[in-house]
Amino acid sequence: MSHVTKVETEFRDGQALETALKQVFGGCESNATMIAYYSSQNQHVDLVVRKATARNVLESSMADIGFKKVGDRYELIADEMQMPYMAKALDRLKQRYAVGVASKAAQATG
């Protein structure tokens, strides 16, 4: 049976995360409802990559991929069945996120 899995991440900057999601997946929505494989597991998240968009990058995507702010970090929320397909995309996401945070810091310092 499929269920939603939550994974703690090191993502803290919402703008940098949103930009990285758009770069890796080709799009994301903010402040939306994440549609899970089973509708009883749908939930509100801060950022969501729709399953149709995620399919462009993942070999398999049966539900949306969400990010929800918990404390000072964003938690990854996804169906456990698509987690094996996400490793490569998460590596790319971390790289794009790091570049975004570094660029933002460089601009702030002039």
Image (tube, rainbow, N blue to C red):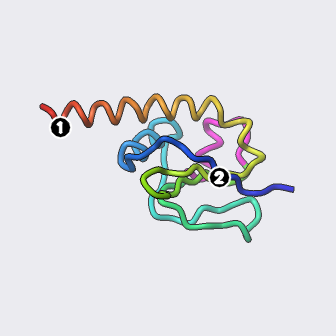
Q: Which residue is mark 2?
A: 6
| Magenta stretch, residue numbers | 49-61
**Secondary structure, magenta segment, majority class:** loop
Residue 90 in percent (x, y) is at: 58, 35
Q: Quadrant of residue 17?
A: top left
Q: Which mark is residue 5?
A: none
The image position of residue 72, as x and y in percent, is 42, 53
Density class for disc 1 (Cα within 10 Å; few <14, some 14-19, many ≥20) is few
Q: CA distance from mark 1 to mark 2?
A: 32 Å
Residue plotted at (17% across, 37% down): 108
**Image-based side of 35 in relation to 106, left or right:** right
Residue at mark 1:
108
What residue do we see at 44% from left, 39% from top? 20
- Circle 2: is it few (<14), some (14-19), or many (20+) Cα within 10 Å? some
In the figure, 60 relative to 68: above or below? above
Q: Nearer the viewer, residue 61 or 104?
A: 104
Quadrant where the C terminus sits is top left
Residue type at tag 2: Lys
Q: Residue at 43% of width from left, 31% of height from top?
A: 96
Q: Secondary structure at mark 1?
A: helix
Quadrant for residue 55, please give it.
top right
Mark 1 and mark 2 lie on one chain; the one further toward the N terminus is: 2
Residue plotted at (75% across, 48% down)? 80
Q: Residue furthest front?
A: 71
Whole-percent x and y of residue 71? 45, 57
